[in-house]
Image: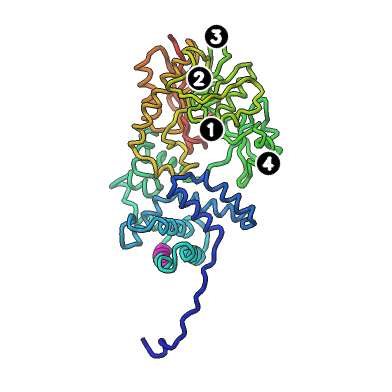
Amino acid sequence: MSEQARRRPPKPYRKPKKDPVRMLALEALRAVDERDAYANLVLPPLLRKAREAGDFDGRDAALATELVYGTLRRQGTYDAIVAACVDRPLREVDPPVLDVLALGAHQLLGTRIPTHAAVSASVELARVVLGDGRAKFVNAVLRRISQHDLDAWVERVAPPYDEDPEDHLAVVHSHPRWVVSALWDSLGGGRAGIEDLLEADNERPEVTLVARPGRSTTEELAAATETLPGRWSPYALRMAEGGEPGAIEAVKEGRAGVQDEGSQLVALALANAPLEGPDARWLDGCAGPGGKAALLAALAAERGAALLASEKQPHRARLVERALAGNPGPYQVIAADGTRPPWRPGSFDRVLVDVPCSGLGALRRRPEARWRRRPEDLDGFAPLQRGLLTEALRAVRVGGVVGYATCSPHLAETRIVVDDVLKRTGGAELIDARPLLPGVPALGEGPDVQLWPHLHGTDAMYLALLRRTA
């Protein structure tokens, strides 16, 4: 070192500046990582607190939301890119550092934030939460990432499609390989279809409202906020981007709600299925958190029927009670296990079981779920799904109808469950669900129905309708 350099005074210490938007985004990502929280549950209260403190305006909230969900949706792709820019396995990099790097990668590769701003903001965030030493590491990695755009990076880190199509799609579209394989099997072939589906999983879903019949109307909701008509459900409206459903009076009062259109179609199909004999007693056997139950209860009230909403978990049963409060017709909410039900066989005319599942049909809304689920998880759901459908068939009277629904397109949770239960129990038959979704295209060969994000703009809901015959 030269004499002049030794005499040069050290640079004064500069306290790192806190960026409230990126701090909040990192806090949400850390909660997802450390506590297995879901972003759609963690983020709203964080945003509300920031607004109340005066730290955020609408643009800040929109940016924080984009940073969190964009990072989670593209996590697999960003991990592959970061791995190509570090000199150690990712498992040896501290998780908070990886989260900062992923946030930075998304700003560089997935947004219009200028390169210098994306790097400097991420390094400053690292200084605040990680310290100067690790901030230098973040700076070095992000500068490497900034040398190429997303397409160029994907070409570098993804294996060629011709050599390994599933791994190629997994890296390009940020899904675990086993999920790509399962979704491809469910779709039934073709590269274009699977790519369209995987890309749809990475898009921000619309917020869809439901006007509960007899309690609200689509006209009332359209007058309250900027909307587009629903695609398929007569009770649906799609909110304009940035709309606040909680600010709508009908939603606050429970006369309307937020509900994916696929979920609405499942409830409507069950309610409209042809029935022989009385139509007075309906059951929602897996009612939590209450969206389908609230729509069913409103439809039942219009016909003079009563709904029993059953949910095993008491805290979820309380959510169902809240969703049904004020329903004009008779209803009851109970906490009960649908595989060991308290009701007598043959007690109901219509039964819905929207069974617990892997949730692979809602990856647009819960992008982190794709990284948490494992193939062996399906083995844990299988006995419960079969048990709930078996008991649902016992609960319905002869001539009555059961709807089996899942928010998963995985064949092991849909058609295989239904076929297996039908073979083991007998006394029931599948009925064609397609005519009960009028106007909805691309419903397949039937008699069951699989909805898709890329074809229908809904979650990937599955529905089979069964009539008890003996």
The residue that label 2 is drawn on is 351
Split into 4 quadrants, where in the image is the N terminus? bottom left
Label 4 environment density (alpha carbons within 10 Å; few <14, some 14–19, many ≥20): some
Q: CA distance from mark 2 to mark 1?
A: 17 Å
Q: Tell me the residue at 56%/10% (across/down).
A: 278
Q: Any mark on residue 225, and which?
A: 4
Reply yes or no: does residue 136 show up in magenta: no
The type of residue carrying mark 3 is Gly
CA separation in Å, label 3 and label 1: 30 Å
Tell me if label 2 and label 4 are in contact, CB under 8 Å: no
Q: Is 4 positioned to the left or the right of 210 in the image?
A: left
Look at the image and tell me whether residue 206 can be seen.
yes
Q: What's the mark number on residue 277? A: 3
Q: Which residues are magenta?
A: 138-147
Mark 1 and mark 4: Cα distance apart in space: 25 Å
Q: At label 2, which amino acid type do we have?
A: Val
Say which of marks 3 and 1 sits in front: 1
